[in-house]
Amino acid sequence: MPELPEVETTCRGIAPHVTGVKIAEVIIRRYDLRQKITESIADLSGAVILRVRRRSKYLLLEMDDGTTVLIHLGMSGSLRVIDPQEAWKKHDHVGISLGNGKQLRFHDPRRFGLVLRLMEADPLDHELLRLLGPEPLEEGFTLLHLKEACAKRRVPIKLVIMDAKVVVGVGNIYASEALFRAGIRPATLANQVSKPRLERLVGAIRDVLAAAIAEGGTTLRDFLDSDGKPGYFKQRLFVYDRKDEPCRTCETPIRHEVLGQRATYWCPKCQK
């Protein structure tokens, strides 16, 4: 699944091509994604895309008519800027043709993504967005915030940092990597993690996500960035998907278990 760094990479990749550009036509080839594509998106011809931004794993295209197109890449989606004459692939569901001769095309083989038109004056008031926690790379994600979120929770710390109401965008891969950097075992109960270790975890989450964004996201089978190129962070992963391989720090075999129905990896020596 594309995680925050992949979505941020996509946001930065498409923004220069679409910001300030008029929509010439919207082509919808299939409506039945996770939720039905908002039919009125087809009426956006003539609207200008004023801004592209990210909130959690959602992309927001803000229009000059006051509405916003929300896009979620789902499990396997991608959003590319292409020549509109490029042949449509089997799972290309939406094409937003632009006045500059380019097209923003949404591709989603598993159809778990979203393409919705939000009518709220502030798109962050929409039901999908209003209960989300702070962005991990912004000022709202602090030691105090994480400490309060963990104080009464007797669940594994990994599940807490993957809870989007606590902090957004820390998906399975980056949760495992951040916990390794902080030296905390994923199954440690959240209310038993000390303040100094939570402080290290806040820094580790910031560092691992910033590094992944700088590298262009994680190379997953289904992810392509806006230029059609895979991300490059996977080659730098320390624990994720490395079961029984030697720890890059101490050479102890990496262990694996399932927490919250998600594959989890850790080093039994480096993480306590």
Image (tube, helix red, strand yellow):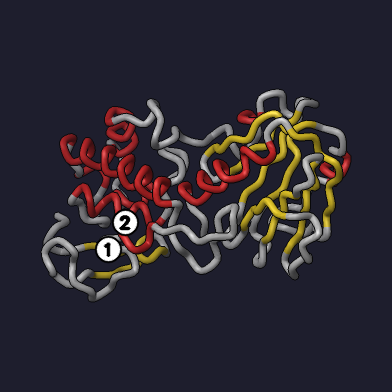
Helix, strand or loop at label 2? It is: helix
Residue at 59% across, 35% down? 53
Residue 228, image quadrant: bottom right
Residue at 59% across, 55% down? 227
Badge 2 local density, few (<14 within 10 Å), some, or many (20+)?
many
Which is nearer the N-term, disc 1 or disc 2? 2
Image marks 1 and 2: residues in contact by CB distance under 8 Å: yes
Figure check: 49 above or below 93: above
Relative depth, front residue between 30 and 128:
30
Residue at 46% across, 58% down? 231
Q: Is 164 left, or right, of 38 in this rendering? A: left
Task: Estimate the x, y position of residue 176 in percent, counting from the top left.
Answer: 31, 56
Quadrant location of the C terminus in the rendered image: bottom left
Relative depth, front residue between 213 and 244:
213
Mark number displayed over residue 125 = none
Q: Is 57 left, or right, of 249 in this rendering? A: right
Relative depth, front residue between 243 and 192:
243
Please give the residue where the numbered disc 2 appears in the rendered image: 176
Figure check: 188 above or below 120: below
Q: Disc 1 marks which amino acid? A: Val
Residue at 31% across, 31% down? 148
Helix, strand or loop at label 1? It is: loop
Q: Disc 2 marks which amino acid? A: Ser
Q: Is 175 left, or right, of 24 in this rendering? A: left
Please give the residue where the numbered disc 1 appears in the rendered image: 239
Q: Nearer the viewer, mark 1 or mark 2?
A: 1
Task: Estimate the x, y position of residue 234 in percent, counting from the top left.
Answer: 37, 62
Figure check: 138 above or below 206: above
Compute the Cα span from label 1 to label 2.
Answer: 7 Å
Residue 20, image quadrant: top right
